[in-house]
């Protein structure tokens, strides 16, 4: 099995790239959904503060690969030749996935902080920051758990500073590289 790991800062466009893979029939496992589901399971509101608490608690209790460990069963149950993991945030997570598959390719989606902040405000997901201070704090937290290292070691970088349609076109081209 080949694993495509999509990484990047919040709001960079990972979900749009993941949608292109999904449209091609390639399964996508979203790591952020693991955190959001755990927050809901605990009866908490899904918001930046609760997501942070749960994410850090899981990593403190189960190690830096805690979220990846929770994705492994879905990965192993897939009969697809290619699977996408969206939202990998540490090299410990990459290592866990690498142990489960034949080949790993890390794809980073990159956008400037200003572009990402504006996208997150427009997206209006319950856990998206609505002010610059919260946005900045989230970025620093993501970097502190190891996201910067995953980004630095990416095999492919998609720069997303243009229109959504241009990102979608580039994403479809990217998917073809893996088919």
Image: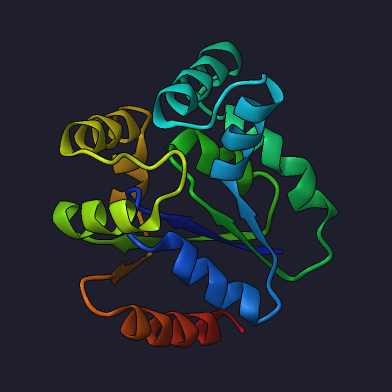
* Residue 145, image quadrant: top left
Q: Residue at x 55, y 19 (%)?
A: 63
* Side of 123 relative to 69 (left or right): left
* Side of 166 relative to 60 (left or right): left
Q: Nearer the viewer, residue 135 or 155?
A: 135
- Image location of residue 44, percent across then percent down: 59, 21
- Image location of residue 84, percent across then percent down: 60, 62
Q: Nearer the viewer, residue 123 or 110?
A: 123
- Image location of residue 61, percent across then percent down: 58, 11
Q: Name the quarter where the C terminus is drawn.
A: bottom right
Q: Name the quarter where the N terminus is drawn.
A: bottom right
Q: In the rendered picture of this protein, how many numbered marks are placed on residues?
A: 0
Is residue 46 depicted above or below 109 in this figure? above
Q: Residue at x 58, y 74 (%)?
A: 21
Q: Residue furthest top?
A: 61
Is residue 140 depicted above or below 115 in this figure? above
- Image location of residue 165, percent across then percent down: 36, 85
Q: Residue at x 45, y 48 (%)?
A: 125
* Side of 95 relative to 42 (left or right): left
């Amino acid at each position: 099995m080949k694993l495509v790991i999509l990484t990047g800062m919040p709001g960079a466009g990972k979900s749009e790239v993941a949608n292109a893979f999904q449209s091609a029939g390639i399964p996508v496992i979203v790591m952020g959904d693991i955190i959001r589901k755990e927050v809901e399971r605990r009866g908490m509101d899904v918001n930046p503060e609760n997501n942070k608490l749960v994410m850090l608690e899981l990593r403190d209790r189960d190690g830096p690969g805690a979220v990846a460990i929770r994705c492994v069963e879905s990965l192993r149950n897939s009969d697809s030749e290619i699977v996408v993991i969206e939202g990998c945030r540490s090299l410990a997570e990459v290592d866990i996935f690498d142990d489960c598959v034949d080949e790993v390719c890390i794809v980073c989606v990159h956008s400037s902080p200003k572009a990402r902040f504006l996208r997150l405000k427009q997206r209006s997901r319950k856990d998206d920051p609505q002010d610059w201070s919260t946005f900045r704090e989230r970025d620093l937290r993501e970097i502190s758990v190891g996201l910067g290292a995953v980004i630095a070691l990416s095999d492919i970088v998609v720069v997303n500073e243009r229109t959504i349609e241009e990102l979608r076109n580039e994403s479809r081209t990217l998917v073809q590289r893996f088919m």
